[in-house]
Amino acid sequence: MLGLMQNWPLLAYKIIDYAAQQHPRRKVVSRSIEGPIVETNYAQLRNRALKVAQRLVAHGIRPGDRVATLAWNTARHLECWYGIMGAGAAYHTVNPRLFKDQIAFIINHAEDRLLLLDTTFVPLIESVADQLPTIERYVILTDKAGMPKTALINAVAYEDWLAEADGNFSWVEVDENDACGMCYTSGTTGEPKGVVYSHRSNVLHSLIACMSDNFRISSRDVALMVVPMFHANSWSLAFSALMTGATLVLPGSKLDGASIYELLEKEKVTFSAAVPTVWLMLLQYLEANNLELPLLERVIIGGSACPRAMTKTFADRFGVDVIHAWGMTEMSPLGTFCSLKPETKSLEIEAQYDLKMKQGHPPFGVEMKITDDEGRALPWDGKAFGRLKVRGPAVSSAYFKGAGGNILDDDGFFDTGDVATVDEFGYMQIVDRSKDVIKSGGEWISSIDIENIAVGHPDVAEAAVIGVRHPKWDERPLLIIVPKKDRTPTKQSVLAFLEGKIAKWWMPDDMVLVQEIPHTATGKILKTALRDKFSNHVLPTAQEPAARTGS
Ligand code: ADP
């Protein structure tokens, strides 16, 4: 027997219809690329998105086409997203932090037909434009007055281009399973791969994000969307803020402490989401200027591990609740949230901070398991660690054009590439990336754990740990250190610092000092480059294998 409910397709552009109808005058505030802070609302945003869609269709954009954006978070960028989706096409957010060749690669791979870009990125795109044969037109997100001189083909000022549409238009009808957006992985290993979101996955994922244990966002919130729309689908905020009717604040290109503080204070922000580095800049600015955050209630921190000290400073000093979150582009991207379940409420405050170092528990809609290399499920005891795999309606089933082949196991789970523990309460903690974990004598050593402790040494600025070949143990850890300015930490003193804080057999077999550690475009340590560089490094223990017997 079939249910007798209406078949109301989950189409992402219905979100802006809802916001415009129920919250028409709710403010959308942007720090414009031109400089001033400007204001619009959801009703106006929808009107302009309709014009974008109409203008795209007039250009010849058809359902399934890809339209690229290379832009900061502003109302213009947001209306472009909705206009692209409303034309039946897929927005492709190009990440300006990728290397130039990768930017050209992903635009070609996605076969983007138009590129909508901020003036900031015109020089960058001019330098690769001769490698972009699929782009028919460049729309620069400014008006006539702000239009830079450019040799880009068919370049037009966005406001002029938009003025050619009257907005008398209805969204193009598509299926809820049709492509709606695209984002490429940052390509730490190999070429970037295209993740393709559907209307359905974006709607479900955003509904999930809004729930009380997650964003807990409502029309009473003022949400500052720091996380860029070009980074992992804006963590859903480009949808979830609108579907709840929250006031939306968009920081443009300025993510430094002073600029973020200005928006927090002026716009009375209650809720925000960003990576740890942004919060670090803000906290330093607050400390240096002796400022408070009386209205900010909670922040989502993810993208890389949120340090315990950050959670504690936010809570103790500023009364702000930190919700640590984990996810990845392939998961739309949210996977877990570290909100407190009732069984953890009785923990002492310091123990709660310890718990909040974990990446958290998945919401309804994300299934999770940890397995060994053979795919056998491991216990949820907070100790056993293995490959973290996930399944759900907003998790990738394949990459664009089949890149990377089959990415699911026999039960349909996607291997996240992370190594994690899960405790008895269902809280997941990332231990390492699976490619970075060090396999020593059949056991795994977490490079991240050692790095996190090593950076606590007073002379250490940055630390990386990689596995180096060893004749007896397969691999043993090599500790690579960037010293603080004018300091020269010795191997002895750093190893002594680690002693007692990690298992004996996790102790690095050697340490080297370097000037700098290479990073990916998104600021993660580039372990592949380090492994290449030190592939011939001979560990002192490798020359005398007998010395380690019994350790
Ligand atoms: P990018 O490399 O562009 O940041 P993703 O956002 O897709 O791309 O990166 C996802 C990866 O980032 C995860 O697989 C995980 O390794 C790491 N990550 C994300 N959030 C956290 C977190 N809270 N703690 C530790 N690692 C995290």
Image (cartoon, rainbow, N blue to C red):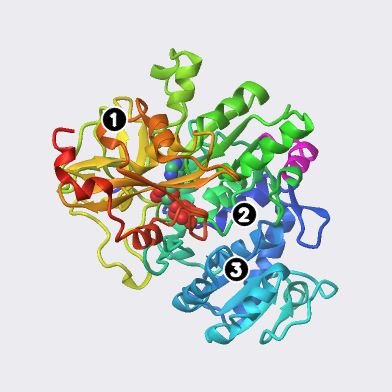
The amino acid type, in three-letter code, at marker 1 is: Ala
Secondary structure found at label 1: loop
For the record, the magenta segment spans 260-270
Left-right relation of 449 to 220: left
Which x, y percent locates residue 150?
74, 82
Q: Which residue is mark 1?
A: 503
Query: Of helix, strand and loop, which mostly describes the magenta segment?
Result: helix
Residue nearer the viewer, 240 or 122: 122
Secondary structure found at label 3: strand
The amino acid type, in three-letter code, at marker 2 is: Ile
Proximity of marks 2 and 1: CB atoms separated by less than 8 Å: no
Q: Residue at x 66, y 23 (%)?
A: 317
Tell me the CA gap for discs 2 and 3: 19 Å
Which x, y percent locates residue 51?
69, 69
Q: Nearer the viewer, mark 2 or mark 3?
A: 3
Q: Which residue is mark 3?
A: 69
Left-right relation of 287 to 526: right
* Corner quadrant of residue 313: top right
Q: Which mark is residue 16?
A: 2
